[in-house]
Image (cartoon, rainbow, N blue to C red):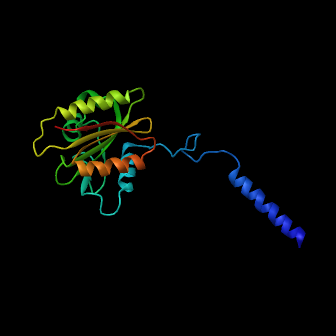
Amino acid sequence: MRKAFALCLAAIIALTCVGCGGSQDAPGENQEGAKPQYAEALDVLDAVVEAYGEGELFAMYGGDQENAVMDAPGKFDISKAEELKATLGLPESQVSNIEDAASMVHMMNANTFTGAAYRLKEGVDMDGFADSVKSNILATQWVCGQPDVLIVLKAGESYAVTAYGNAEIMEAFKNNALSALDGSEILVEAPIG
């Protein structure tokens, strides 16, 4: 009986060590065991939306005009430079610095909330990108009411997230983004007006 118990205990210990042993990372994880980076800009906004609590999220659409999706963020065609500028506030000078984009816009009024995620090309200065977006948004002439706040944050090493809108909605977005996104930090937070 003792021999059987000892063999069972040895087998359990061996299996436990095998399960905890090696330091192979799960697919997409880095050596420090951090969460995987995002495959595309849409994944960034999806992660933020998933962090919202019940009743906290607003009606939205995502993507560009041709490929809009309802009630979710959507992929934005980066070949539409004029629409990137007009809809998301991305300066024309920054269009060539992005590889991918996604958006989420308040269904009733874009000035209430407009958010975007951009994967920047390798070597693009994240702080320079943020400053350029800030200058462009702060210089905008608003038609249907003025947004209260602009936020630009970094998510990981290659994603920038921009958002502007109503102060209360922006506070919820900022908190959810910071809690949901790997390596996130605020680069710009500024009042508009």
Decide: is 97 above or below 15. above
Give how far across and how far down residue 72 sits, in percent.
Answer: 30, 55
Give how far across and how far down residue 67 sits, in percent.
Answer: 26, 48
Residue at the spot 17% in from the left edge and 31% down from the top edge: 139
Decide: is 120 above or below 54. above
Give how far across and how far down residue 135 sits, in percent.
Answer: 23, 30
Horizontally, residue 5 falls left or right of residue 142, namely right
Residue at the spot 16% in from the left edge and 50% down from the top edge: 109
- Is residue 128 or residue 70 the one in the foreground? 128
- Is residue 179 or residue 31 the one in the foreground? 179
- Is residue 186 or residue 80 the one in the foreground? 186
Give how far across and how far down residue 86 sits, in percent.
Answer: 18, 38
Horizontally, residue 27 falls left or right of residue 86, namely right
User: Is residue 152 in view?
Assistant: yes
Horizontally, residue 146 falls left or right of residue 78, namely left
Indicate the quadrant where residue 29 lies.
top right
